[in-house]
Image: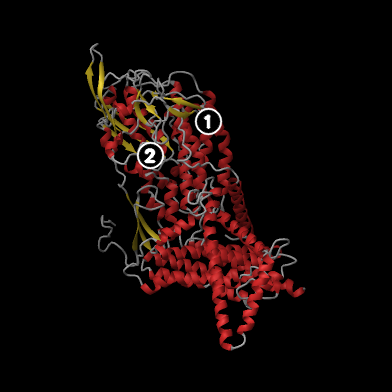
Amino acid sequence: MPADLGAFLQGVFDQVHLWASQSPFWSALFSLGWGIVKVILVLGFIIVNVLVLVWLERKFSGRVQSRLGPMRVGRPHGWAQTIADMIKLLGKEDIVPRAADKALFVIAPVVIFTATMLVYVVVPMGPRTIVSDLNIGVLYLAAAASFTVISVLMAGWGSSSKWSLLGALRGAAMLVSYEVPMVLAVIGVVLLSGTLSTNAIVESQSGLWYILVQPIGFLVFLAALFAELNRVPFDLAEAESELVSGFNIEYSGLRFAFFFLAEYANLLALSAIAVTLYFGGWQGPFLPPFVWFMLKTYGFILLVMWIRWTLPRVRVDQLLEFGWKVLLPAALVNLAVTGVYVLLT
Amino acid sequence: MTITPEFRPAPGDLEEHEFLVNMGPQHPSTHGVLRVILRVDGERLVDAIPDIGFLHRCFEKVAEGWTYQQVVPLTDRLDYVSAMTNELAYVMAVEKLAGIEVPERAQWLRVLVAELQRIASHLVWFGTFALDLGATTPFLYAIREREHILDLFEALCGARLTYSYMRIGGVRGDLPPGFVGKTREFLKLMPSRLREYENLFMRNRIFENRTKGIGRVTAEEAVAYGASGPTLRGSGVDWDLRRDEPYSAYDRFEFGVPVGQSGDVYDRAVCRFKEMYESLKIVEQVLDGLPEGDVRAKVPRVLKPPAGDVYTRVESPRGEVGVYLVSDGGPKPYRVKWRAPSFAHLRLLPVMAKGHMVADIVAIIGSIDIILGEVDR
Amino acid sequence: MHSLTSLLTGLWSFICGLWVTLVNAVRPPVTFQYPEKYYVPLEGFRGYPALVVDPETRETKCNGCQACARACPLGVIHIETAQREDKKRYPVEWRLEFGRCMVCNLCVEACPFGALTMSPEYEFAEYRPEDLVYNLEALKLPPEGFEVRRLDGSTVRTGLAGGGRG
């Protein structure tokens, strides 16, 4: 049945595309319409998965901590808890501090969510299921991932609070310093696969997953991932920063919901990228590619959560020291070794 | 530098590049309602001034209006995480003043509950300390293990936090049926769980990086400021009231006393953690040799100790708890002065915090293990 | 600070921690859902002071000697008595301001007749502070008693006649 449905939809799509290519106006309109459909699909995918992810985090942390987690909202195991929380956040008063830079304060949540959505453009969920198979996929990824820094700074400055600003500055310092080792680690994968396109990287792992040949690169990438995601052990932008709650302290209601949503959407996006680069993406026998993709992504997310609920937080100067003095040399060594290997074969 | 109640420094007191951060009474990482005013120069702490009194409940004044027996449940509420040692300190003071002899079985039971209480209190310390440093999970594990001890206390005296178990002349009641068996089960379970916590948290590299070298206190400073308990032992001073000035039945038992070396947060934390193992040993020895007999001496209904004064001290999980009791011959105490260890340790805060970064203050406060109930009384 | 051995031992400490978390994740949870499943307190749990009653006559053993009222540190017990034909005193009014009671057990220990005990009830929240003042009828132990458990795992019903441990 799914195969037929896919073929049917493909047939419809091809027909419309053919019909639209008759005139430049219609074909432009078609491209625009198709783009909007893709955005809506991605948005739907994100929202459904974020609802599941928040619930999963709470349930998983409960399991690890010998307790039950949400149980009441939605009788079997509180599956509707996130929906209830979102409704609660939507119903809160919209407070903007009087001295706040209103434009920045209002735009920051939107920017962070957009930045997160941008990553989904190059996430391959199947052999031809990708929003846009850019042939500079990895380069685009590095660029899009840096967007979150801007929104953190906007939120920190726009809140007009001393501690919010300092938290945002620290968060920005962390994000920026950990992007360098992350990109260097990814370049190791790029060297092995010989292409920047994410779909091609997945296809080139049909024989061997890159995690097996890039263990150090993966560890560097994993450490940088925690910094990019703002999760323990690197969550100082949010939690302890200057003794208060961090850069999103002045946000409430829907704006806070945006930050919250963006955090989990980011988790999903970067986990999907990790799976794409190191674990063979949608490749796998017997099951449809999309199912493999989801299984692997959620497996990786469980690993991220497992680490989060085990480790304590790192202090900010130790974090920066670790990023520049340990991760960067390790990524460079990894790159050198990979480069030599590729040169010799 | 003086801080006015409106949280402003006097003019001319603050250097130009310094500013004040208020770590207010409501804060997730101060253990109770403690306000710490931090004087910060960029990232570095210049001074950390504790501001206390938010939990003052006039214990010493109220105690002057109640009879000796009635004050016992009041002492529960001072250091509420470790209520048994508070009661012990007080009843020992009254017994010393009135010359009451406590039966042997009661002394052993007192040691038993005091040591179980020590484990429970250190578990709370461990959980909250890990929570302050960002690891949420050890807190849940510590609370889970503490449930066993609280169940034992619930069966013993009916309450889980404010026990009202000690009485002048002994303890309130004997062990209920099944208590010894359940305690032995707990003794078998606990060492493996403690080793789990070591693997999860105490041996964690991030924890070591955040606590080694932080908040150093030299032995001379610690003694000069009146530190006691693990705060003192972390600096290398080998002093434990249970071993060096034994009270109750402590001279019958063999146990080790962990001592640190450098007086930093890490050493204090490790001292406290290792004390849990030693307390387990003591509980086992008590259960093995518990003598028969009464659990309460005959004490007149209205107790009137002869006029005089006495100072007794016990080793609570936090340090030396002292009671200075003055009697005027009447049925109510003339003066009950409570010496709280956390009060003295708070004075060490500026000494420990100087030169460190703002992010370290949380680890430092956690390592002192303060309970505001006894600081403010 | 960052020699290779130090990095490897650091990584090993993380792996040990992850193992502990994993081991605990497969243990069953220790919490349960409270209102659906009632927490059965242990025998001797101090809930609120209650009057022991004779199972048939529902009369208390109290004769109004005020020992408990005097023993109470907070003075929350108020008793008024009257005399019967056979000169025995009995309480006409027996009031306990439970909102201020600290459940210290001193009243139970002071009673020379064993008329007081601690009932293991803990669900006594009220909407108004006035409802927390208990009178004579409310303080009498209910005939069905309370379910409590013992450390060996058995459950018993207590408070039926002689009362719990004082």
For residue B183, the mark is 1
Q: Is residue B166 above or below residue A57?
A: above
In the image, residue A341 lies at what x, y percent? Answer: 74, 71
Badge 2: few (under 14), some or many (20 or more) residues near its Cα, within 10 Å? many
**In terms of sequence position, does the residue under pointer 1 or pointer 2 come before the other?**
2
Please name which of the two marks, 1 or 2, marks the residue nearer to the observer: 1
Quarter of the picture containing the N terminus of chain B is bottom left
Q: Is residue B133 left or right of residue A301?
A: left
In front here: C69 or B2? C69
**Crowd class of label 1 (few under 14; some 14 to 19; many from 20; radius 10 Å):** some
Under tag 2, what secondary structure? loop
**Disc 2: host chain:** B
Residue A38 falls left or right of residue B331: right
Of all chains, the one bearing label 1 is B
Determine if residue A337 is in view: no
> Hey, which residue is sitting farthest right in the picture?
A345
Above or below, comparing residue C42 to residue B223 in the picture: above
Mark 2, residue position: B79
- Numbered marks: total: 2
Q: Which dot marks residue C23?
A: none
Image colouring: secondary structure
The amino acid type, in three-letter code, at marker 1 is Thr
Tell me what residue is drawn at x 41 percent, y 60 percent.
A89
Residue A233 location, x and y as percent? 53, 58
Quadrant of residue C7 in the image?
A: bottom right
**Looking at the image, which is closer to me, B355 or A141?**
A141
Whether residue C2 is visible to the viewer of this picture, yes or no, is yes
Quarter of the image where one finds residue C101: top left
Which x, y percent locates residue B285?
Answer: 53, 28
Secondary structure of residue under mark 1: helix
In the picture, measured across the screen, residue A247 lies left or right of residue A4, that is left
Quadrant including the C terminus of chain B = top left
